Amino acid sequence: MSEPVLQLRHLSVDYPTRAGVVRGADDINLTVYRGEVLGLVGESGCGKSTTGAAIMRLLRPPGKIAGGEIIFDGQNLMELSAEEMRRLRGARLSMIFQDPLTCLNPLQRVSDHIVETIQTHRPEVSEKDARKQAAELLDRLGIRAERLDDYPHQLSGGMRQRVMIGLALALNVDLIIADEPTTSLDVIVEAQFLDQLRDLQRQFNLTIILITHNIGVVAELADRVAVMYAGKLMELADVRLLFDDPLHPYTRGLLGSVPNINLTDDNLQIMGGSPPDLINPPSGCKFHPRCPRAIERCQVEEPSFKEVRPEHWSACWLYE
Amino acid sequence: MAHVAKVDAEIGLLARFLQGRKWYGVEWYMTVIGGFIVVFIVVLTLLTFFTPRLAPYDPEGMVGDPFTPPSTQHIFGTDQLGRDIFSRIIYGAQLVLQVALLSAVFSLVVGVPLGLLSGFLGGRLDRSLSLLMDSIYAFPGLILAIALAALLGAGVLNMSIAIAVVYVPIFFRLVRGQVLSIKEELYVEAAQSLGARGRTVLWRYIFPNVIPSIVVVFSLNIADAIITEAALAFIGLGVDPSRPDWGYDIYRGRSELVGGRWWPVTFPGLAIALVALGFSLFGEGLSEILNPRLTET
């Protein structure tokens, strides 16, 4: 493995609500290596986006990081001031969002967005040079230079998504967090987008955390996959390993519930129940109420997340 | 899409004017009619500053018998001092518009920045400013304006300030609310994730998206301020009794209604109604066109 870019150590995020504190992410330990695509999958509300936002330190209030360390390039982000953190965002780590239709300011031209991002971090770059860079950037993403001065509403969803990638790539970032980047695209645009993202990733050796609930997207793009459930990491492994030999019953459930043209209806296994209410999380393993293989111990004690097999991590009593 | 945009741009101004309803619905007519009244009054009033010869008679001179009913000589009649009411209405607009415009500008200049900061920064500043603005808002507007006008004394500037104070909370609340909702927009989050500074976010991402609502409320505010100005003048807190002023003219004419002399009251009243209606229609129409989501101001 290459050098680690990002290490999460015991990262926890709390959302204080009137009914009680919701732990949106619970004791996350994760290392992201340079040049890899790490897929972060799970059902809605399991803490994927929370983890992503926590890394950027852009949690929406009232969310706050309750504990742990975010080590980015040897530096604990938790110790940085707001201003230092701001300088890091966009320059060294950036984010791609779910909804390309609303991620650009409707009153700013595409060029304004890019020029502004470049000049925010490198004020010495002149407007003219920044524009030139913007044109090159768009060209690389397959958007013709004459669209540079278009407003977001004049672009299609896929183009806006590409502009968003362009913004994230405008400076030489070390880490990109892509939060459900394809959810609102149709399948054809999604396929094009994934192709392009993979090309860019290879070309620039990008490090990407790909947050998604779409197993297919993960299979296509990710090198390693982390599975989250109810704010906890459940399993982490190489993408092949995870698909061929999933250890955690939750991962099996997720993989089994993906429709496949080769399966008949009977073979599609639907996971019963829904993710737990995080104000009153279940005792022991958070997955045990839905787990087909739960044993008594699961109700009482929470399994720790450990390396069960080489390079294959899981939090489950079945592998103790 | 670029093709469509091009075709749009080729449509002439006149065609746009005539076919606006197709794009904007019935509100287009409100805007056009309101806008027409507004432009008409404003241009007319501007002209009165430069030429005294716009009205048929000297608005402040005795040019006929007292209480001449509307006739061909004095189309709106004359008041108790024999002054031509039509001429007084034309020149009276000066004062009304000056005060209304100034007060709306004042409240905008104070209310908008405070609302932007309050909504964007939140916290203690937001709480104290909101409390202050809500307390002002809780007063009946006219009574507050009367108290302030009495306190500050006569004069265009003082009257404008008195009225402006009443309307600052309207701008403040509108802008604050809009900032709070725009702050949640994805493009604001995206800008922050790319390292945009707080002031960049406020100035380039939030403020431009609030402008349409400000324009609308500004126009509606002028309409309101016109009526407030007239009300202040009506109770004798006007600028200067010798200058033509619609509100004050109504006040002096009101006792004549009993004797069947309706014209000294009716025509200034109609003028107030017409101008206020113009600004209201313009503002409401614009609000529909610019921002369909804005229902309450």
Image (cartoon, coloured by chain):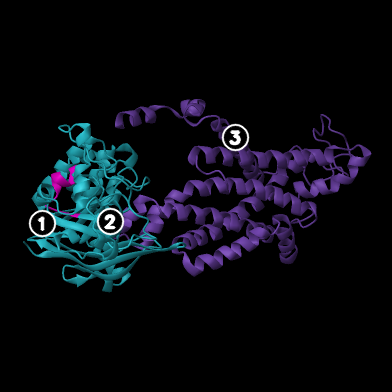
Chain colours: A cyan, B purple
Alpha carbon distance from label 2 to label 1: 35 Å
Give the position of the N terminus of chain A as an image quadrant: bottom left
Alpha carbon distance from label 3 to label 1: 63 Å
- Mark 1 surroundings within 10 Å by alpha-carbon count, few (fewer than 14), some (14 through 19), many (20 or more): many
The chain under label 1 reads A
At x 74%, y 64%, the residue is: B153
Q: Secondary structure at mark 3?
A: helix
Circle number at residue B57: none
Q: Position of residue B87 (x, y in %)?
A: 76, 40
Examine the rendered structure and indicate whether residue B95 appears above or below residue A269: below
Q: Amino acid at mark 3?
A: Phe
Determine the residue located farthest toward the right in the rendered image: B259
At x 88%, y 44%, the residue is: B80
Q: Compare residues A85 and B282 and report the one nearer the observer.
A: A85
Q: Compare residues A309 and B264 and report the one nearer the observer.
A: A309
Q: Secondary structure at mark 1?
A: loop
- Mark 2 surroundings within 10 Å by alpha-carbon count, few (fewer than 14), some (14 through 19), many (20 or more): many
Q: Amino acid at mark 2?
A: His
The chain under label 2 reads A
- Give the labeled residue for mark 3: B36
Q: Position of residue B226 (x, y in %)?
A: 68, 48
Q: Secondary structure at mark 2?
A: helix
- Give the labeled residue for mark 1: A35
Circle number at residue A288: 2
Q: Amino acid at mark 1?
A: Gly
Residue A138 in sight here: no
Q: Position of residue B276 (x, y in %)?
A: 67, 42
Q: Which residues are magenta?
A: A216-226
At x 71%, y 58%, the residue is: B145
